[in-house]
Image (cartoon, coloured by chain):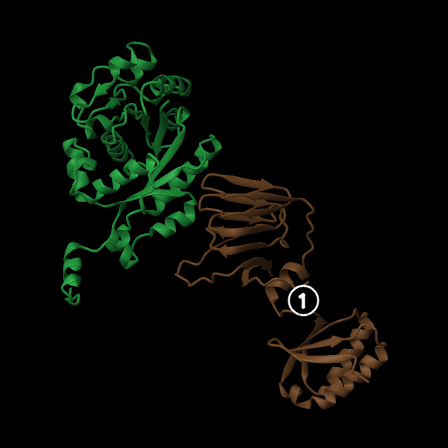
Chain colours: A brown, B green
């Protein structure tokens, strides 16, 4: 009989993948078995543990956490549900996991937004083209630039910190999300030629490489 | 029916007037009937660059205000067949002309000339509005400076919103050495930002300064590289398909000679 749980080691710690259809009791016993068989895994001092595959009630979470603490003998830093993503990419989680904003309206602008021009909309904005220095794009929702972003963009302009900005080439003069204003660092930095995402966490703007979600 | 082309840039000092003078002369050398209009009222220069300063009797403002006929104000360049200049007024300002009058003037000149080149003043105000109002197409001049490219971008945006679609650009004063050293924006960098068609790349050339001061457009100088480039641009305006001279990788004569004799570059 196959196990109802799988352990996956990640950069950040451990992820427990659970089978949704099996009864919770089986999951508990399978976790116990896994811990015993994977003792080596728990030699590290402390672990951040995440789970996915099924929804857990608070009580069920507590039970699993106790089991982990009792059987593995390591410190558990945190125990939480992982956003439903295949990649261990914090940036994506920030963008989608915490994505409380859901603007249904989206404006699509085709062409280059040039110096002195402004695209303003009370929803999401997609620019199919470049945003040049001296141009502004301001959206109440999220901003996606299918091209080079070299100008100023302001996502979540009404103060929504869950708004995010994605660009194929993120080289902005200035980035604003909600009421946070950031600019590119002064020192020269080799920037990746891959899509990037900017989002807010703990009152700071983070920039991460953007990978596409699997369907 | 002639074609009205406005030569503009946004930023001052990038070479609009020099470009106008050289392209106009270049087109006249191709046996076209050409008139150059200086719309930089109050700060006229095109007459100086063309060496026609001492022949001005009437100007653009006189024409639009009806003090004279267009024919009377046109200065014929005696050196080049088919080349005329309509100078700007020096004692007035940009508000002395309005876009409607420019459209009417262009319509009138269109009947007799193949090309009407309009030298636009710097800036985006009334003078710019006047200059572009009668134009069919636009040429934007820029230099490989961040500020000039920024202004060119702004101008292209304004041209596009004024129904002057697909402007072409001329990149002026490119210093091949600096580009090769990575100290100057490359042509590709500029095209990447502006996303418009390239009409020509003019290398920085001391001969331009000399010819501008003498009032003899460099395009007539067969030894000048910049002159060669202007001749090519004129031909491109006429629809000829001439590859863009790659000034960035243009080697000095000495280097070419050395390579020819197989001498390693020791310098």
Chain to which the residue tagged by mark 1 belongs: A
Q: Where is residue B260 in the image (x, y as percent from the top left)?
A: 16, 61
Is A77 placed left or right of A155 in the picture?
right
Q: Position of residue B224 (x, y in %)?
A: 18, 43
Query: Is residue A21 at least partly visible in the picture?
Result: yes
Report which residue position mark 1 lands on. Answer: A85
The answer to which image quadrant residue B169 occupies is: top left
Is B119 placed left or right of A121 in the picture?
left
Which element carries disc 1, helix, strand or loop?
A: loop
Camera-side residue of B234 and A79: B234
The answer to which image quadrant residue A202 occupies is: bottom right
Residue shown at the point (53%, 59%) measured from the top left = A195
Quarter of the image with the C terminus of chain A in it:
bottom right
The answer to which image quadrant residue B178 occupies is: bottom left
Residue shown at the point (36%, 32%) measured from the top left = B123
Camera-side residue of B91 and A180: B91
């Amino acid at each position: 009989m196959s196990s109802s749980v799988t352990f996956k080691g990640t950069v950040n710690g451990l992820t427990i993948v659970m089978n949704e259809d099996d009864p919770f009791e089986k999951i508990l016993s399978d976790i116990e078995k896994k811990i015993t068989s994977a003792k080596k895994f728990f030699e590290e001092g402390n672990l951040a543990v995440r789970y996915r595959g099924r929804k857990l009630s608070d009580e069920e979470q507590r039970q699993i956490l106790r089991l982990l603490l009792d059987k593995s003998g390591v410190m558990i830093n945190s125990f939480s549900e992982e956003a439903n993503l295949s990649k261990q990419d914090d940036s994506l989680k920030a963008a989608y996991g915490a994505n409380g904003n859901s603007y249904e309206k989206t404006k699509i602008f085709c062409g280059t937004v040039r110096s002195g021009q402004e695209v303003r909309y009370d929803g999401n904005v997609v620019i199919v083209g470049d945003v040049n220095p001296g141009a502004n794009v301001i959206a109440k929702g999220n901003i996606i630039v299918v091209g080079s972003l070299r100008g100023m963009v302001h996502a979540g302009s009404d103060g929504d910190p869950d708004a995010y900005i994605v660009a194929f080439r993120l080289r902005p003069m200035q980035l604003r999300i909600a009421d946070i204003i950031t600019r590119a660092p002064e020192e020269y930095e080799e920037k990746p030629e891959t899509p990037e995402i900017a989002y807010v966490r703990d009152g700071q703007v983070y920039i991460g490489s953007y990978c596409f979600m699997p369907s | 029916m002639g074609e009205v082309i406005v030569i503009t840039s946004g930023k001052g000092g990038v070479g609009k007037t020099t470009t106008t003078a050289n392209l106009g002369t270049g087109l006249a050398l191709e046996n076209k009937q050409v008139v150059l209009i200086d719309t930089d009222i109050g700060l006229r220069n095109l007459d100086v660059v063309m060496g026609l300063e001492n022949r001005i009797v009437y100007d653009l403002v006189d024409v639009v205000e009806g003090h004279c006929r267009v024919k009377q104000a046109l200065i014929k360049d005696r050196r080049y067949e088919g080349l005329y200049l309509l100078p700007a007024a020096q004692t007035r300002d940009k508000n002395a002309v309005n876009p409607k009058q420019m459209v009417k003037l262009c319509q009138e000149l269109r009947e007799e000339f193949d090309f009407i080149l309009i030298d636009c003043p710097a800036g985006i105000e009334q003078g710019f509005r006047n200059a572009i109002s009668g134009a069919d197409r636009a040429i934007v001049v820029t230099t490989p400076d961040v500020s000039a490219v920024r202004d060119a971008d702004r101008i292209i945006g304004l041209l596009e919103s004024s129904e002057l679609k697909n402007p072409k650009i001329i990149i002026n004063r490119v210093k091949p050495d600096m580009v090769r050293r990575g100290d100057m924006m490359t042509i590709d960098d500029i095209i990447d930002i502006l996303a418009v068609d390239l009409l020509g790349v003019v290398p920085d050339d001391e001969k331009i300064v000399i010819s501008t001061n003498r009032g003899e457009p460099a395009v007539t100088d067969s030894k000048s590289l910049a002159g060669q480039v202007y001749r090519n641009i004129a031909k491109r305006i006429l629809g000829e398909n001439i590859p863009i001279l790659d000034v960035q990788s243009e080697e000095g004569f000495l280097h070419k000679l050395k390579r020819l004799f197989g001498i390693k570059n020791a310098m």
